[in-house]
Image: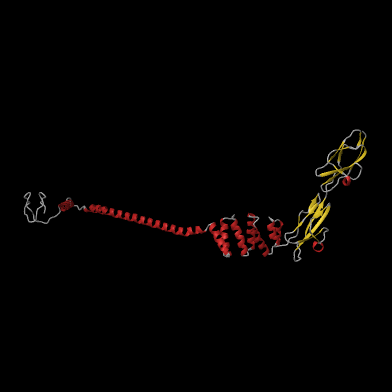
Amino acid sequence: MICKKCGEEIENGLMYCPKCGESIQLVPDYNVFEEELLIKVVEDKDKAKDDKFASGVYKMTEAPVILQETKTQTKPTNKYIELLKTVFTKKICIIIFCAVVCIAIIASCMILPYLGTHNYDYAMNKAVDAENQFQYAKALGYYEEAYSLDESSFEAIYGLGRMYYRIKDYDNAVLMLKKAIELDSTNKKIYSYLLSVYDESGDTESIKELAKNPPNDEIAQLISAYIMLPPGFSYESGEYDEDLLVQLTTNGDYQIFYTLNGKNPVTSGKLYNKPIELTEGTTTIKAATQNKDGEYSEIATAEYTIKHHELSMPVVSPTDGVYSEKIMITIDVPEGCTAFYTWDGSDPVENGIQYMDPFPILEGASVLSVAIVDENGNASPVYRGNYIYQP
């Protein structure tokens, strides 16, 4: 118990405070603050009661207090609601964030494996594996994917050509194999596939086109296994100003028969065994190849017109006449030609002396004969001059 006067702690059972001597009231102990608060409440009620009846008019004095209390009580409520809203919004944000992360993870799991398989090297490796296992349709799909990723790839283009051939899609096979040849014009394997496509589809005309201008002898020999072509000529048809030695060629181990008179070489031909010599004039050669079974190729024809250049009269100086001094004779010889001369009037082409350097005039009266012969054996008109040398 506490002494009301001095605040000293008093033991139970004592009637007076041992410190100040104040008498002790035996009432229950209570809190001083609560007592003061209770007194304050009683005084406020008494004052309100006095104010209520002071003028004889009823005034609501407690209402403002109630309103104030109500207003004070709503503030925590609003704050609570705002807190709930804040918490609720954060939760939503967290949920949304988690959802986005999950979607990103799922997308990565789906897209990354796809990206790992959707590239050129992967497609080419799978295509080669499938082709080695003779799964041509499957290999075709991978080669098409590789080609879509790199349309300039020789491996993809050549692979497509092979696979289209395997599945007998000859049109696309020809398209791709021709593209492959453009990238590698001497690849024998590409020609093998292309020739097989032409052969199986019965396109002999395309084989003939390939045989017209093969890139090398090895591929020409390869083409010869598919078709017996007509003989080839070492010179094309046309006009020439010199004699020719025409050679006939074949693309395989075949015999060649030919004619020079325009007749059919299959029925009237002569076996070819050496170059054909053509001289001035027009000559038509017809030729055909024959295989071991006696079958003939188509007939090839070439026409040649040879017209030699006409040589003009030789130019000799000095000209003929009477001379009292010893002179030197010179002859103007065109390039590629040879000059011949005689002093007795005979034919210089048959009996003449080859002109090398200027030569002296002969004493007395002489007839100088000069002729020019070109590299094809064509002779010019003969120059003849009367020379008299009288010292």
Q: Does residue 26 sit above or below 359 in this rendering? A: below
Residue 57, x across and y down, in percent: 19, 52
Q: Does residue 40 sit above or below 269 in this rendering? A: above
Quadrant assignment for the C terminus: top right
Is residue 206 among what the camera can see? no
Quadrant assignment for the N terminus: bottom left
- Give 19 or 113, whichever is nearer the viewer: 113
Residue 148, x across and y down, in percent: 57, 57
Residue 232, x across and y down, in percent: 75, 57
Residue 17, x across and y down, in percent: 7, 51
- Give 321 or 390, whichever is nearer the viewer: 390
Residue appearing at x 54%, y 61% in the figure: 126
Q: Tell me if 384 is positioned left or right of 143 in this view.
A: right
Residue appearing at x 63%, y 57% in the figure: 180
Q: Does residue 324 sit above or below 180 in this rendering? A: above
Is residue 315 among what the camera can see? yes
Instruction: Tell me the colour scheme of the image.
Output: secondary structure
Residue appearing at x 71%, y 57% in the figure: 212
Q: Tell me if 191 is positioned left or right of 321 in this view.
A: left
